[in-house]
Image (cartoon, rainbow, N blue to C red):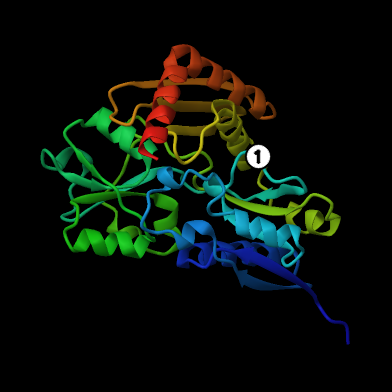
Amino acid sequence: MMHKRLVRVGTRGSALALKQTEWVIRSLREVHPEVNFEIKKIKTLGDSILDVALAKIGDKGIFTKEIEKALLGEEIDLAVHSMKDLPTILPPGLVIGAVTVRHFPGDVLISADGSRLDELPRGARIGSSSLRRRAQLLAYRPDLQMTTVRGNLQTRLKKLEEGQFDATILAWVGLHRLGMTDVIAQRIPFTVCLPAVGQGALAVEIRSDDTEMADLVRKIDHRESRSAVTAERTLMHCLEGGCQVPIGAVARLWGGTLILEAMVGTLDGRRLVRTMDSSPIDQPEQLGIRVADKLLKLGAADILAEVRERAELDG
């Protein structure tokens, strides 16, 4: 009797990371019923340090580095990441084998009493450690009080319940994957808050010389999602952004055209530059470079220098 090929899949151990990985494995099983999959949970730096804001840790690979090390060491055959956690430059020897079909990439508001963003009382406390969300929300409503919060989704909801803040902002996709969309008070419009680069998509990372895994994951690679994410990641790379820089971006397809909208803002939301451009679907890198260049000309270079200088002083 022939044994099925066993593929070891590396992931973080959080409830959301496991749901995402199970979803990828189900998608792979549909096209490869002859393969067995085994999940290997790997603890990352970001999972170990929960009492420090991401911006202060300042490491772009805090949710991926240990998993990538296991992949390079052949302890696992492929890795599943939230695309927004994956640095724009991968370690030598690794590539993105597949970008899964992207779900709605935007952010949502969860409030203690079900209030929408415009209905929150003056001076309402918002729990979020994201500099991107902070900059855009303060630009929209300067009266809001931003409170740093870390931890998984359940931890944040518990803190909200306990009254540590009045509302929190999370990615819609995480709540959707965990079957918890009923707690959402409002989807925040892109006109108010652009999402994180890559938000809503998953990356399946493989070794660049592993042709067997490349063939295995190719069938779940979604061309339109890969193109949109590539435009956003190129923009991020041009601006040299990471966790510690408030950059928001979303690329969407309109007919056969790819439209990229992006912003850079100061932490207090007082200065915010925003622009957009479009290109054919097969030119995402050129689009990312063009939009980054436009932002820099609008003043993003000064904003980014100021944010980095402040981060160094705080660090």
Numbered label tally? 1
Q: Residues within 10 Å of mark 1 (few under 14, many from 20)?
A: few
Question: Residue 153: horizontal and vertical position, in percent?
Answer: 37, 60
Residue found 28% across the figure and 59% down from its top = 183
- Quarter that holds the N terminus: bottom right
Question: Residue 311: horizontal and vertical position, in percent?
Answer: 40, 35
Q: Residue furthest left?
A: 122
Asked which quadrant contains residue 246, the reply is top left
Is 209 drawn above or below residue 13 in the view shown?
above
As drawn, is 119 to the left or to the right of 309? left
Question: Residue 38: horizontal and vertical position, in percent?
Answer: 67, 74
Asked which quadrant contains residue 35, the reply is bottom right
Is 305 drawn above or below residue 48 in the view shown?
above
Is 35 drawn above or below residue 258 in the view shown?
below
Q: Residue furthest top?
A: 297
As drawn, is 117 to the left or to the right of 3? left
The type of residue carrying mark 1 is Ile
Residue found 52% across the figure and 27% down from its top = 260
Residue 72 visible in the shown view: yes
Q: Label 1, on which residue? A: 89
Pick whichever, 85 or 305, lies toward us.
Answer: 305
- Quarter that holds the C terminus: top left
As drawn, is 7 to the left or to the right of 11? right
Residue found 21% across the figure and 32% down from its top = 141
